[in-house]
Structures are given as C-alpha cells and as structure tokens.
Image (cartoon, helix red, strand yellow):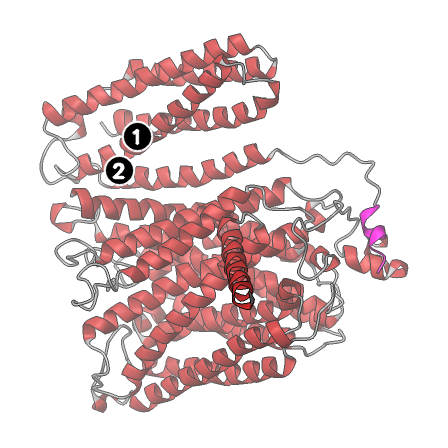
Amino acid sequence: MNEAALFTGDSNEAWELPSRGIVGMLCLIVAEATIFLIFVVAYVYYLGKSLAGSTPHDVLSIPIFTTICLLSSSITVHLAVSAVHHGRSMLASIWLVATVLLGTIFISGTAMEWYHLIYRDGLTIQTNLFGTTFYSLVGLHATHVIFGLLMLSFAFLFSLRGHLTTEQSNRMEVLALYWHFVDAVWVVVFLVVYVLGR
Amino acid sequence: MDGTLVEAEEIALRNSALQVLHNWVTTVDHKKIGLMYIGSSLLFLVIAGIEALVMRIQLAIPNNTFVSPQAFNRLFTMHGTTMVFFVGMSILFGFGNYLIPLMIGARDMAFPRLNAFSFWCTFFGGVLLYFSYVGGNGLSGAGSAPDVGWWAYAPLTARPFSPGHSTDYWTLAVLLSGVSSIGSAVNIVTTVVSMRCPGMTLGRMPLLVWLYTVMSMMAFVTVSPLTAAQIMLMLDRYVGSHFFDTQAGGSAVLWMHFFWIFGHPEVYILIMPAFAFANEIIPVFSRKAIFGYPAMVAASVGIGFVSLSVWAHHMFTVGMSAGANTFFVLATLTVAIPTGIKIFNWLATLWGGKIHFTTPMLFAIGFLFQFLLAGLTGVMVGAAPFDWQLSGSYFVVAHFHYVLVGAILFMLFAAFYYWYPKMTGRMANEALGKWHFWLFLIGFHVTFDFMHIPGILGMPRRIYTYEAERGWMVWNLIVSSGALIQAVATLIFVWNLIWSYFKGPLAGPDPWDAWTLEWSTSSPPPEYNFAITPVVESRRPLWDLKHPEDSDSYYE
C-alpha cells in the first residue's frame, strides 16, 4: 500500500481548530450548569414546603453589596486577561489582585451570612427543607468561588514572578471563562434564592 | 555459576514484569487506557454475568431456597449497577478512547492525564462497589452489599430503611463512575472538536466519531444530574438533610425524576456507540459506503435531543397528571422516528451490497433484527395505558434486556471481532466466533423471548421466588436454561480472545479491506499513532488510496 499518498494531501488551506482548553472548559461548564440546575430545581420545588423552622422571608436579607463585588470581578478578570494578552504583566497583576479581593469580599459575605443564620436564627442544613436546599445550593456555588479564588491567586503569584507571559494568555482565558461562569451562576442563584424565593 | 545466572535471569524477568505493570499503571496513552477500560469491564461483565446466572438458578423452579431473599436483593442491585456503570459505560468509553484519535488522525486524546484519571476513577469505583461485600458488616456478617436496586428509590435509601453502609458504598461507587464519565465525555468532545487532522471536516468524520460526540454531549447533561442527585443522597445520609426524607416534607418522587433524568438518556448513551459500531461494520462488509450519511448524523442528533425529554415514561404509574403522561408518551414515541431512519439506512446500505458473512457482520445483522424487536416492545411499554398493566412486571425486564443484550451486547461482540486484529495484531478465530454467535443467538432468544410471557401472566420483577400454582414455572425454567446457553457462548468468546492472542494468524494493517484511518496504521498501532499527521480529502481516506480511479473525493 502506498502510504505516502495518504499523507501528502494539499494542506495549503489553513486548518485551524478551536483551542483545547477553551473547548474543554466550555464542556465542563455545560456539565456544571446541569448540576446547578438540579440544585436550583430542588430549591424551587421545596419552596414553602418546609414543615417547621424558619422560612426564607424570615431570615434572608438581600446581599446587594457582595453581589455587586462578585459581578464586578468579572470585569476585572477580563481586564487581567487582556493585559496578559498584550504582555503587560504588571497591569495583569493589579487586575488579578483586584479580582481576588472582590471575590474574597463576596465569600466573606457568604460566611457572615451563614454565621448569622446558624447562630442567630438556628437554621442549619438539618432544620428543614429550606435549610437543606439553601445551604446545598449556595454552598455549591461558594465551593466554586473558593476554587476559582485559589486558581486566581496562583495566577497572581505567577504574574508577580513574571511567569504570566503572552504565551499563557490562552490559559488565562480558560480561567477567566470559569470565573465568568461562577458569576453567571450567581445571577441565577441570586434571583431564585434572594429575589423570587423570598 | 549456573545458579547465579538463572537467578539473575529471574530477577531480570521479575523486573521486566514489574516494568510492564508500571508502564500500564502510569500510562497516558489513549490506546492503553482504552484497553484497560475494556479489560476492566470484561472482568465486571463476568462478575455481573455470574450474578445473573445465580438469579436465574434461584428463579428456575418455584419455592427455591438457593439464595436468601436478602441475598437476592443484593444480587439484582449489584447486577444492575455493575452492568450499567462498570460494564456498559466503561466498555463503550474504552472503544471510544481507543478508536477516536485513530479515526480522526490525532496522536492522542485532548487531555491524556484526565483520561487516565477517568479510567482509574471508574475502576476504583467498581472495586469499591464490590468491597461492600467484605466491608460494612464484614465477612462474618456475609458483607453488606447494597440491596436498594440500581434505581435506589427513596425512601428505601434513607437511614432507617437502609442502616449500615451498604447504600453508602453504592452511592460513592456511582458518584465515582459519574465523575469518570463526565471526564471522559469532556475529553471526547474536546478531542473531536480540536484535534482533527487537516481535511477532516465535520462532514468527513467517520459516523462513529459523530455518534460518540453526540453520546458524550448527552453524557454531560445527563450524568451530571445523577452526580447532583448522589450528592443530595449523601447529604441526606451523612449530615441529616431532608432532600428525600418524606417525614420532613421531602419528596420520594423528586428522586425518581432526578434518577430517571439520568436513567433514561443513559440507555441512549449506551446504545449510541452500538449504532456507531454498526455504522462502521455494516458498510465495510457490504462493500458499500453508508447510505444517507447526513440523515444518519441528523437522526443521531435528533435522538440525543428527544431522549432528554422522555425520562418520566418510567413513572407512568407514580400518579403524574394526565397532561404529563401524555407529553411523555408522545416524546417517547417520537424517538421511533430517528431510530427508524437509522434502521432503514442500514438496510439500504445492505441492499445490493456484496455481503461478507464474517463474525462481526453476523453479530451486526443479529443486532439489526433484535433492535427492531426491542423497539417494538418499547413502543408497547411507552404507551401509558399499556404500561399501567405491565409496569413492574417481567415484561419490562424482558424489554430492556432485549435492548441491552440483543442490541448493545450483540454490537459490542461485533466490535470486538472487528477491531480485535487492530488491537492485538492477530485475527480472532472465525470458527470459534461463529460458534459463539449461533450459540449466543439461540441462548438470547430462548431467554428473552420467553421472558415476556411470565410478565404478561403477571409475574412481578424483583421477587426472589414464587408459588408453583402461579403457572410461571415452565416459562422460568426455559428462561433459565437460555441463560445457561448464553453463559457457555460467552465462555467460547473469552476462550477465543485468549487463544487468538497467542495463536491467531497475523492480521497486517488492514485485514478487512476497510477505509477509515485506523486501518492505515500498523496493527497494533505505534505509540503516537501516526508518524506524519495524515491529511484527508473524503469520508473514506483509505478507500481513495486503494482505489484512486474511484476516489470518493470525486463525488464530493
């Protein structure tokens, strides 16, 4: 068999495929979105069905400030990516640290909210269906925020040491994509839990 | 002097054995991982097959006391869980892993380490599931294997109904398998989207690659709900939340929804690769290009979408509203349209072809016939009024085994015989293969054709024994003897795999005169598949090469 013929096709036309990192992350995001969807469905399904204990209206207050912080961190991470893209490592560090700070404010807000819910209102995951669905849904999101913050902090450390060069801009984009997803999920959680569900 | 030499040789041999083991355990090569997936699922296939045989022995005669009721519950739970998660999913991902990079002209999967992680995750999950027999109450308590059924309906899985750790083993094992499946699915889609060789446009991809892509996309929107549901079940069991706790207002039906949102598309996830194998094998042994390539792709995507809205046909007897029942009947029956298109296209491919009745082709033809029959009983139980009569009876068991064994397993056997030369470099024995086919065909029909009858006569599934006067005995005896015939046939198959590995004639790169890219490499393929990245110009690159006067690229 003349193998050569198979391998000497006309490769003049440009053959460019999407980057692996972006496609993989998009797939992961679809899978994750489905997981969140199931928890949101459970939350909505059990709204008002708790037999005892507190209700969302009694104990939840709308976390406007921390929400604004989290959503603006999408902008800062975008600016960080474009800084990396243009090879401006210093600027990237600044935007990255801003993103981490904003995310930390958000997660501290969640921590304070949970502290009050547990110690002031006596609402735990065991209390009733509201506790069960609230902590699992918001907790699932918080886990994703913490994971994202860890990755962003690593990126920040790398940028300080000058390892975040233009070649890494693709990886930064993948990380930013994840972070945008975490923010987008929060919009849904915020609407379902704090606006409609209350 | 002599003694030390022998000793040195022994040490060298031992070292090389360790080296080989080390190479397999640490490998990130997609072919080795694929083979490990296939090997581990064959192991679990044998275990779950033995469980099925024990159940059939128990049910062969009335008032049998071969196993206890509790042991029977464990058997059907373990059989179902093993077959779906640790045989079905892993064997299909195994073939996918092996074939996809070869077929699209890539050197490996997109994320080789994630690939290895996925395999070890699912393998460990299977080991964990079976460890439950020695864990939990320990060996002295005869183990505490899960006994909640593979559907694990709430509140059966709640602490009061399922004390001990058996259900924890189940949920952890399934969770691990789910994580592994999502990882593999992400890997497959990414590989197909971003690793195709130059010229391999979407319209030129082998249909196998198309179907695996659809299957993987289905996997990450349906396995994830299962993963979410497993997390909820764990929270219920470990930290006392109330998702499925009816005492605190939780809902058992919500578990059913969450489970079947995964559970039904799962059947399509399992059968997509079977379709994929048929799409490769039937054309090659008919010596014709597949009929209606675009229609096949469209039908696969169609099945993918429709299958996402059919899950509640498992719940017609739960007491949903008439509107919901109607919707799910219609959605379920709609699947018949794309599957019908597929069957007609396979028949059209066969039509007027020079058919070669090799073992893979025999299994493929068996698949066509049996898949059609399975679809017909599927239409029966897909209609709510009919399902009200037969839900929870052996008719349903017969129907889904018709799909799982008659369609999926037959096509898997075909795939084994078809790609065995590529994977091992040697041909599988045709005579043994034909013995395997005919015996298995007979065993299959004796088992599952007759299993419909006790179902219609009212025999419920999941019962461990029955009284003689029910009139189910003759049918059960026939069914059980059919299961034994299948077991003998499977032994022939396993013997064939082993014998041919050592004694089979050398295969050469392209023993079937096929036309997809994997047959352009040596058998087995070298470490990185292709020394030079191939460039393709049509759907049948190898055909173009062998028949330059009749190249497909002229017709595109």
Q: Which chain letter matches label 2?
A: A
Question: Would residue A92 be visible to someone looking at this image?
Answer: yes
For the magenta stretch, what is the residue range?
Answer: A1-8
- Residue shown at 74%/54% (left/top)? B539
Residues at marks 1 and 2, CA–CA distance in whole angstroms: 8 Å
Q: Which mark is residue A43?
A: 2
Residues B326 and B379: in front is B379
Q: State whether the magenta stretch is mostly helix, strand or loop.
A: helix
Q: Quick one: label 1, few (<14), some, or many (20+) residues within 10 Å? A: some
Comes first in the chain, label 1 or label 2: 2
Magenta region includes residue A57:
no
**Horizontal side, residue B145 vs residue B116: left or right:** left
Label 1: chain letter: A
User: Is A6 one of the magenta-colored residues?
Assistant: yes
Quadrant of residue B163 in the image?
bottom left
Furthest-right residue in this view: B549
Q: Residue at x 41, y 69 (%)?
A: B400
Where disc 2 sits, the SS reads helix
Image location of residue A87, percent across then percent down: 60, 13
Q: Nearer the viewer, residue B164 or A189?
A: B164
